[in-house]
Image: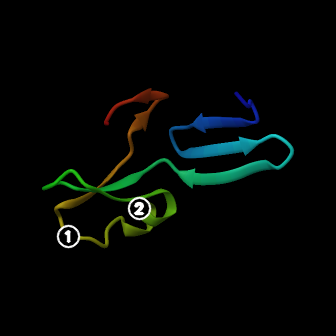
Amino acid sequence: MARDLAIDLGTANTLVYKQGEGIIMNEPTVIAKNRRTNEVLATGHEAWDMIGRTPSFIVAVRPLRGGAITDF
């Protein structure tokens, strides 16, 4: 198994580091979810951009708080 990726699931941002390339992904740790169906509609920057611009049944969820999983 290759060991060239590292993932940091942070409270504010999720980072992916690839050996030899550096950080290849830096996205907000947030999802947009349909409250009625539990369907995930967007993640990262796309979900962040939806905050405050969607109907009330679409919510932004930040699954980590203080380094612990609080919503999944």
Tell me: residue 31, above or below residue 17.
Answer: below
Which percent across, then down, holds residue 39?
A: 25, 54
Which percent across, then down, holds residue 18?
A: 76, 43
Residue drawn at x 44%, y 68% as measured from the top left = 49
Element under disc 2: helix
Neighbourhood count class around disc 2 (C-alpha, 10 Å): few under 14, some 14–19, many 20 upward? many
Q: Amino acid at mark 2?
A: Ala
Q: Nearer the viewer, residue 35 or 1?
A: 1
Residue position for label 2: 47
Q: Quadrant of the N terminus?
A: top right
Q: Amino acid at mark 1?
A: Pro
Q: Which mark is residue 31?
A: none
Q: Nearer the viewer, residue 39 or 10?
A: 39
Element under disc 1: loop
Which percent across, then down, holds residue 71?
A: 31, 36
Which percent across, then down, holds residue 72?
A: 31, 36
- Residue extending farthest to the bottom is 53
Q: Nearer the viewer, residue 24 or 66?
A: 24
Residue position for label 1: 55
Residue drawn at x 39%, y 29% as measured from the top left = 69
Tell me: residue 44, above or below residue 68.
Answer: below
How many discs appear? 2
Neighbourhood count class around disc 1 (C-alpha, 10 Å): few under 14, some 14–19, many 20 upward? few
Q: Earlier in the sequence, mark 1 or mark 2?
A: 2
